[in-house]
Image: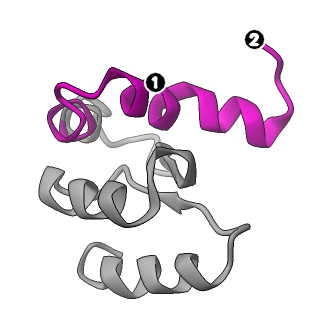
Amino acid sequence: AMNQFRTAVEIAKKHPNVMLEVSGQPPAHLNEMLDSLGPDRLLFGSDWPVYPQAIPIAKVLIGTEGNPEARIKILRDNARRILGIKK
């Protein structure tokens, strides 16, 4: 949840197999998550098919501005890795 993201980060730090889904997070939270966990533990996804995806995607783009490696991992590569999809 947006307001409990720091708790989620602390749980993820204790459990290396935990990844955090970031689609609802504002860019400042995303930056804290990146600083704490790195881009390999963050993932974009959504279970709100009726909600326009432009806003959450824009938040990720703003939060990863100047960091193309993190952007690609969060928006694509981490999901591929979890799902076992080869490039």
**Residue 28 belongs to the span the image colors magenta:** no
Residue found at the far top of this picture: 87
Residue 42 falls left or right of residue 14: left
Q: Which residue is mark 2?
A: 87
20 relative to 72, above or below? below
Which residue is drawn at the image coordinates 24% and 64% (left, top)? 32
Which residue is drawn at the image coordinates 24% and 35% (left, top)? 64
Q: Earlier in the sequence, mark 1 or mark 2?
A: 1
Front-lying residue, 28 or 67: 67
**Element at label 1:** helix
**Element at label 2:** loop
Q: Are marks 1 and 2 in contact (CB under 8 Å)?
A: no
Q: Amino acid at mark 1?
A: Ile
Q: Which residue is mark 1?
A: 72
9 relative to 7, above or below? above
Q: Is disc 2 surrounded by few (<14), some (14 to 19) or many (20+) residues within 10 Å?
A: few
- Quadrant housing residue 29: bottom left
Q: Amino acid at mark 2?
A: Lys
User: How many badges with numbers are in the image?
Assistant: 2
In the rendered image, residue 1, in percent from the top left (x then y), is placed at 36, 76
The quarter of the picture where the C terminus appears is top right
Which residue is drawn at the image coordinates 46% and 41% (left, top)? 49
Secondary structure mostly seen in magenta is: helix
- Quadrant housing residue 30: bottom left
Which residue is drawn at the image coordinates 31% and 59% (left, top)? 35
Which portion, as a residue range, is magenta? 59-87
In the rendered image, residue 54, in percent from the top left (x then y), is placed at 24, 28
In the rendered image, residue 57, in percent from the top left (x then y), is placed at 29, 33
